[in-house]
């Protein structure tokens, strides 16, 4: 069974990069409002302190580069995805619209969604490392009492925590659970209106592991039309997709597997779900980045899967 620990990104040779910190406009306003720190310089130092602590938990390059404050290409990642408005509409229009943020990290996307109107009482967050969720409280100067979103620490590849079953095409026979009493994700099967999973799939370096994770998440989604899974991940154009070995920022190597928009669409519409029962939207975005003094083109895919 694949491990949920994202081995490709165990890169202890990298160090936190203060120069990558950059907040302005919408994201600066959001972090000032949510942390209660209205002095930009004090906010910056606060961010640096949390970054250092997070780096001790795991030396992810995204922590080094402050990607927890923004999408590599866009600020406040979830809120800038093409399906975000429809996601918020689910929260406004549907009764008990359970929303699960998978791989929630510090909980930035959850907090932004709630600030934009998604009902807090319907939100659940999960991550492998509970330390990151606790650092989220430290980042935003909250506690579980003042920000009572249920958090579940668990391994997405542990069947006791997230078991794979076939997606639901009719309403589940079990009632929706009380999300405040959850000890695993399994009682949510067939009851989740929206799932977000940002910058997670590419952490697992094989096609097998990514497909397994997709199947597990699909089993949680409600069969009601409009229910959605939304996210983004590292990707490649069709001709460059597949398995590869890449250099890490720390000078090592990592195994990666990249889906392209075409192969990602074919996976969800026809393999994960019965063909024609979902609509898949993808958008490939590129940017020139720099590492170790060299420039390279990096690709991310924004995507959404919606039940029809």
Image (cartoon, grey):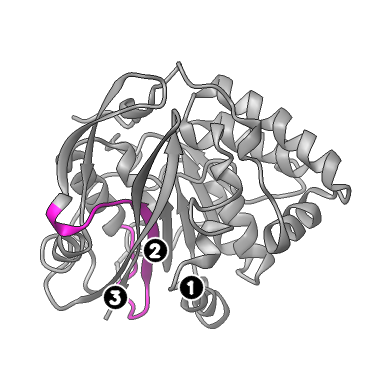
Q: Nearer the viewer, residue 280 or 51?
A: 51
Q: CA distance from mark 2 to mark 3?
A: 12 Å
User: Percent x, y for residue 295?
Assistant: 40, 40
Quarter of the rendering containing residue 112: bottom right
* Count of marks overlaid on the render: 3
Q: Residues within 10 Å of mark 2 (few under 14, many from 20)?
A: many
Q: Residues within 10 Å of mark 1 (few under 14, many from 20)?
A: many
- Which residue does the numbered mark 1 point to in the structure image? 87
- Is residue 146 visible in the rendered image? The answer is yes
User: Percent x, y for residue 71?
Assistant: 51, 53
* In the image, farthest residue toward the right: 39
| Residue 34 appears left or right of 246 | right
Question: Is mark 2 in CB contact (under 8 Å) with mark 1?
Answer: yes
Q: Is residue 140 above or below residue 287?
A: above
Q: Is residue 14 above or below residue 75?
A: above
Looking at marks 2 and 1 on the same chain, the residue that comes earlier in the sequence is marked by 1
- Which residue does the numbered mark 3 point to in the structure image? 307
Q: Nearer the viewer, residue 81 or 174?
A: 81
- Is residue 5 visible in the rendered image? The answer is no
- Which residue does the numbered mark 2 point to in the structure image? 230
Mark 1, secondary structure of its residue = helix
Q: Residues within 10 Å of mark 3 (few under 14, many from 20)?
A: many
Mark 2, secondary structure of its residue = strand
Q: Is residue 43 above or below residue 124?
A: above
Determine the residue positioned at 58% across, 29% down. Answer: 131
User: Percent x, y for residue 272?
Assistant: 17, 60
Pick the quarter of the image with the C terminus: bottom left
Mark 3, secondary structure of its residue = strand
Looking at marks 3 and 1 on the same chain, the residue that comes earlier in the sequence is marked by 1
């Amino acid at each position: 069974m694949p491990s949920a620990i994202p081995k490709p990104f165990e890169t202890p040779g990298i160090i936190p990069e203060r120069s990558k910190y950059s907040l302005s406009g919408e994201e600066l306003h959001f972090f000032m409002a949510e942390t209660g720190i209205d002095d930009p310089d004090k906010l910056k130092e606060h961010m640096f302190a949390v970054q250092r602590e997070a780096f001790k938990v795991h030396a992810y390059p995204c922590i080094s580069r402050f990607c927890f404050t923004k999408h590599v290409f866009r600020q406040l990642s979830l809120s800038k995805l093409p399906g975000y408005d429809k996601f918020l509409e689910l929260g406004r229009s549907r009764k008990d619209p359970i929303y699960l943020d998978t791989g929630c990290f510090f909980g930035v996307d959850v907090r932004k969604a709630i600030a934009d109107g998604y009902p807090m009482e319907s939100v659940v967050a999960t991550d492998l490392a509970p330390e990151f969720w606790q650092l989220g409280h430290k980042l935003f100067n909250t506690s579980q009492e003042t920000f009572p979103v249920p958090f579940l620490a668990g391994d997405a590849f542990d069947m006791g925590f997230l078991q794979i079953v076939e997606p639901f095409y009719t309403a589940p026979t079990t009632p929706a659970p009380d999300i405040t009493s959850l000890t695993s994700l399994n009682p949510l099967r067939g009851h989740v209106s929206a799932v977000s999973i940002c910058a997670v799939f590419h952490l697992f370096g094989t096609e097998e592991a990514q497909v397994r994770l997709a199947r597990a998440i699909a089993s949680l989604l409600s069969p009601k039309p409009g229910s959605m899974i939304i996210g983004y991940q590292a990707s490649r154009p069709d001709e460059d997709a597949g398995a590869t070995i890449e250099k890490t920022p720390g000078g090592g190597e990592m195994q990666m597997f990249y889906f392209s928009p075409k192969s990602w669409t074919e996976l969800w519409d026809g393999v994960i779900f019965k063909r024609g029962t979902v609509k898949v939207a993808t958008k490939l975005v590129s940017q020139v980045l720099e590492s170790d003094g060299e420039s390279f083109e990096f690709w991310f895919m924004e995507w959404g899967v919606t039940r029809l």
